[in-house]
Image (cartoon, grey):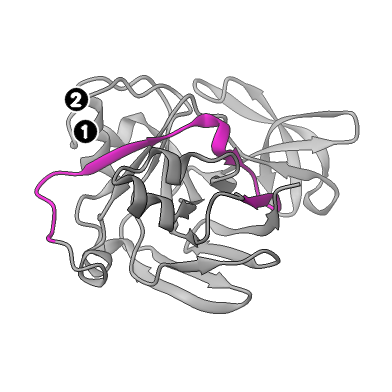
């Protein structure tokens, strides 16, 4: 099942994608819900970020191929950091290139959307706390990351957390092909088989540290192939079983 958040004419909200039709979502996204009446064709609505997280917990160096790419040792525990909710944008929206940065990179990732409050859960229990999965781009000002020696500024700018295009609820997060394209050229190609800590392990680990709330997002890490974007570029994150998240890079006005 694909959950969208949309704007159509003078209304909007959560909906369910039925083929190429958007239908209203009746009930509570984080509780019991069902499909309602047809709203419009997918082509006629504006898709928004499918969820508004209170926090985004991201994971560094969580693909074996990426750790090798940057010459880092395989971590013994997940390396986590936070991205602010103000960084979230949806499909088709613009990533703004900050004036204070000289290199801004794409990082295609699988995002986990939490479905109910999770505190001190085990990895074996984690699946029951997951609503679904999204494509995610952990946009990073690489020069500022190196300069600061910590990641808050480099990864926290407004527009640096594109996610979407919808939440896929009926998905096994293992064995998924993940690709990132820059202006149509393949830059990243890997599989979630290469995750060092899988989605269930991450939910379990993070919930021992902080309570995960409904709508929170875990960005599970990026594979090898990271690289810079420029103003005017188009970046597409494509994940098997979910779809394509497309965003564009623009200058700050």
Any magenta on residue 82? yes
Residue that mark 1 sits on: 204
Q: Residue at x 48, y 24 (%)?
A: 54
Q: Residue 4: give x, y in percent of width and height.
A: 65, 40
Q: Residue 76: give x, y in percent of width and height.
A: 9, 49
Question: CB atoms at circles 2 and 1 under 8 Å apart?
Answer: yes
Let me know if residue 165 appears in the view: yes
Q: In the image, 169: left or right of 191?
A: right
181 above or below 157? below
Q: CA distance from mark 2 to mark 1?
A: 7 Å
Any magenta on residue 56? no
Between 48 and 230, the one nearer to me in the picture:
230
Q: Residue 30: give x, y in percent of width and height.
A: 50, 23
Let me know if residue 1 appears in the view: no
152 above or below 92? above
249 above or below 120? below
Which element type, helix, strand or loop, lies under badge 1? helix
- How many marks overall? 2
Between 47 and 87, the one nearer to me in the picture:
87
Q: In the image, 147: left or right of 141?
A: left
**Quarter-of-image position of residue 14:** top right
- Find residue 208 and name its label: 2
Q: Quadrant of the N terminus?
A: top right
Between 53 and 167, the one nearer to me in the picture:
53
Please provide the residue range marked out in magenta.
Answer: 73-97
- Residue furthest to the bottom in view is 185
Mark 1 Cα shell of 10 Å, populated few (<14), some (14-19), many (≥20): many
Q: Residue at x 59, y 46 (%)?
A: 166
- Residue furthest to the right in view is 9
Q: Residue 200: give x, y in percent of width and height.
A: 25, 41
Mark 2 Cα shell of 10 Å, populated few (<14), some (14-19), many (≥20): some
Q: In the image, 233: left or right of 138?
A: right
């Amino acid at each position: 099942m694909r959950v969208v958040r949309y704007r159509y004419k003078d209304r909007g909200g959560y909906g369910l994608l039925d083929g190429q039709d958007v239908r209203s979502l009746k009930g509570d996204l984080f509780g019991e819900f069902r499909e309602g009446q047809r709203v419009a064709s997918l082509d006629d609505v504006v898709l928004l970020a499918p969820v508004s997280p209170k926090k985004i917990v991201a994971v560094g160096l969580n693909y074996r191929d990426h750790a090798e790419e940057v010459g880092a040792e395989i971590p013994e525990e997940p390396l986590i950091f936070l991205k602010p909710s103000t960084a979230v944008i949806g499909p088709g929206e613009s990533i703004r290139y900050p004036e204070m940065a000289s290199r801004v990179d794409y990082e295609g990732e699988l995002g986990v959307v939490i479905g109910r409050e999770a505190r001190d859960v085990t990895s074996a229990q984690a699946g029951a706390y997951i609503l679904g999965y999204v494509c995610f781009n952990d946009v990073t000002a690489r020069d500022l990351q190196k300069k600061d020696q910590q990641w808050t500024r480099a990864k926290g700018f407004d527009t640096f957390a594109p996610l979407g295009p919808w939440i896929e609820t009926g998905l096994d997060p293992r064995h998924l092909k993940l690709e990132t394209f820059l202006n149509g050229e393949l830059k990243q190609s890997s599989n979630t088989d290469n995750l060092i800590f899988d989605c269930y392990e991450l939910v379990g680990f993070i919930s021992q540290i902080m309570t995960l709330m409904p709508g929170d997002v875990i960005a599970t890490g990026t594979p090898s192939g990271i690289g810079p974007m420029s103003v005017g570029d188009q970046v597409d994150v494509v994940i098997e079983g979910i779809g394509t998240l497309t965003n564009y890079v623009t200058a700050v006005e």
